[in-house]
């Protein structure tokens, strides 16, 4: 038999075999029990739910939320076709499920990235308070505890109280439901958590976006003990939200340098782009990229504000 015919016959047999085989690789609906689900606003989850890999920005957000309270995440975060966001348990594992479309819509509606952060923090609060371990799911007392946790975390991360409440103001029901308190009670819970965090010291980082607030004031050049960088070699000081206490600078040699007690360390480089909105890209030593906008702010590939460059 000619080679081409033999090959075609083999391929046809393989196709038939795959068609007859069980769909072991097909994605299956998530097997969670509604009794172990706490949703953000009480919208019921209908129909089969499927999970997807979370965005890099969301994974980083969760890391910052947990870092603000000094804990490691004991849950997984997944994008899913859910109405907004939910804390769930299935297969004896804790999950945060969120709608990527919903998160983007919230940030646009509230004109700040804090909207999405508060929602994810609320769902994390459900897990940390043990709400998903019982059989109650969402109920008013649980929701208020999660709201208070959200306010606490956002203050620690640097949000104003209005920023911490932005998503709740835009999304919560004005009247109470069987599972969720009225909007005014939830706003009070967020405020209570925010003030409790402030009394305990508070935080400094900021990730707000599209805010009309004034740009951060220029940073000083106070450095820890070690070799100083001559001022004439510097372009600006770089402040990263995830590392507010560390000193980074951009130099006229287009280098990103970090100053520590041990001295100066080159950790990245700056290059021009063809994008008028983001004219520069900063590449780190481990080949991660962030973009420097024309307004001096630094953004991730996903459009999340990561920090800013201040004149010195």
Image: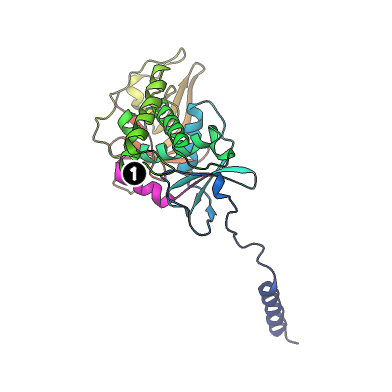
Quadrant (top left, top right, bottom left, bottom right) of the C terminus: top left
Q: Which of 245 and 61 is in front in this view?
A: 61
Judged from this view, the residue extending furthest toward the bottom is 1
Residue at the spot x=68%, y=80% of the render? 12
Q: Let me know if residue 58 is in the magenta part.
A: no
Residue 177, quarter of picture: top left
Instruction: Please provide percent x and percent y for residue 259.
Output: 45, 21
Residue 247, quarter of picture: top left
Q: Nearer the viewer, residue 140 or 117?
A: 140
Image height of 221 relative to 68, above or below: above
Number of numbered discs visible in the structure rendering: 1
Q: Nearer the viewer, residue 127 or 54?
A: 127
Instruction: Please provide percent x and percent y for residue 184.
Output: 32, 35
Instruction: Please provide percent x and percent y for residue 169.
Output: 31, 39
Q: Is residue 246 left or right of residue 162?
A: right
Query: Quick check: can you spot residue 181?
Result: yes
Q: In this view, does 216 lie to the left or right of 102?
A: left
Q: Label 1, on which residue?
A: 173
Q: Nearer the viewer, residue 199 or 226?
A: 199
Query: Over which residues does the magenta segment extend?
Result: 96-113
Residue at the spot x=40%, y=19% of the render? 229
Residue 131, quarter of picture: top right
Q: Let me know if residue 110 is in the magenta part.
A: yes
């Amino acid at each position: 038999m000619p080679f081409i015919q033999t090959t075609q016959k083999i391929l046809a047999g393989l196709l038939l075999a795959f068609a007859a085989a069980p769909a072991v690789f097909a994605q299956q609906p998530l097997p969670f029990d509604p009794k172990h689900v706490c949703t953000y606003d009480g919208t019921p989850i209908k129909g089969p739910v499927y999970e997807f890999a979370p965005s890099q920005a969301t994974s980083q957000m969760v890391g910052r939320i947990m870092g603000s309270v000094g804990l490691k995440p004991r849950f997984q975060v997944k994008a899913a076709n859910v109405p907004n966001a939910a804390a769930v348990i299935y297969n004896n594992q804790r999950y945060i499920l969120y709608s990527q479309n919903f998160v983007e819509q919230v940030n646009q509606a509230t004109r700040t990235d804090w909207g999405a952060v508060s929602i994810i923090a609320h769902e994390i609060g459900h897990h940390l308070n043990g709400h998903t371990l019982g059989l109650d799911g969402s109920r008013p007392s649980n929701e208020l505890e999660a709201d208070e946790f959200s306010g606490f975390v956002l203050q620690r991360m640097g949000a104003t109280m209005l920023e911490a409440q932005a998503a709740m103001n835009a999304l919560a029901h004005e009247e109470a439901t069987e599972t969720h308190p009225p909007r005014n009670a939830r706003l009070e819970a967020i405020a209570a958590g925010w003030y409790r965090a402030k009394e305990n010291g508070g935080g400094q980082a900021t990730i707000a976006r599209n805010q009309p607030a004034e740009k951060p004031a220029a940073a000083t050049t106070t450095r820890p003990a070690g070799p100083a960088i001559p001022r004439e070699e510097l372009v600006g000081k770089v402040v990263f939200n995830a590392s507010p206490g560390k000193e980074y600078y951009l130099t006229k040699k287009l280098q990103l340098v970090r100053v520590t007690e041990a001295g100066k360390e080159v950790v990245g480089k700056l290059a021009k782009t063809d994008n008028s909105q983001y004219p520069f890209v900063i590449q780190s030593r481990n080949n991660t990229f962030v973009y420097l906008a024309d307004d001096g702010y630094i953004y991730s590939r996903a459009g999340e504000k990561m920090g800013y460059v201040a004149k010195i």
